[in-house]
Amino acid sequence: MSDPTRAPSARREELLESAYRYALRSGLADLSLRPLATAVGSSPRVLLFLFGSKDGLIRELLARARREELALLDRVRSDVAGSDPATVVRATWHWLVAPAHRPLLTLWLEAYARSLVDPAGPWADFARQTVDDWLAVLAGPPARPHADSDLVGRTLALAVLRGALLDLLATGDVDRTTAAVELHLSLVDAGGGPR
């Protein structure tokens, strides 16, 4: 078993990055240490030593995915700092539809679903954490006050984005899903309701 208080080694970080690239290609649901170890140039024994267990490795891979997602979304947030909520939602959607983000988003969706059906496993709290992450991104600048109506509006925007994202990942239809997001934004603007 690895010692979690020990400083991470260069080899551990290298294997984590290689395993992360493997997970982006292959997913995590059927992750088996032997094929993973072969793909990353290691052995199951070394992976178990460095990460403690298969669950420990999955937790590290999920944390790695979440760090990447948050870094990318923070860039979106900083690009639209001071903008109205519709601009924040639109910028977030444009980030979501970028083909380069599909592997990360597919992995995110897999982990999100697994955390709902296996809340005690390595996926624990992943879905809840990502809801909180996304609500924070949709809040715009950190200095903006967060009234209850603002939270409801961000929750609605998140629901629309998440639904459109599920559809996009299933169908690949960027035009239709983008039109649906734009229709939502126009209806919110027309009704003056929460965003």
Image (cartoon, rainbow, N blue to C red):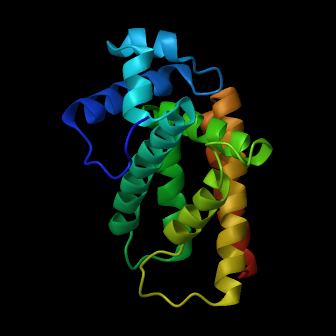
Location of the C terminus (image quadrant): bottom right
Residue 138 can be seen in this image? yes
Which image quadrant is residue 55 in? Answer: top right
Residue at (44% x, 16% y) in the render? 44
Residue at (59% x, 66% y) in the render? 132
Q: Nearer the viewer, residue 83 or 46?
A: 46
Location of the N terminus (image quadrant): top left
Q: Nearer the viewer, residue 113 or 9?
A: 9
Q: Residue furthest right?
A: 117
* Image-based side of 163 in relation to 106, left or right: right
* Image-based side of 117 in relation to 44, left or right: right
Residue at (72% x, 77% y) in the render? 152
Which image quadrant is residue 85 in? Answer: bottom right
Q: Is residue 183 above or below residue 164?
A: below
Question: x%, y% of residue 180?
Answer: 70, 50
Residue 189 can be seen in this image? no
Q: Nearer the viewer, residue 149 or 41?
A: 41
Question: x%, y% of residue 13?
Answer: 28, 36
Residue at (39% x, 47% y) in the render? 68
Question: x%, y% of residue 158?
Answer: 66, 61
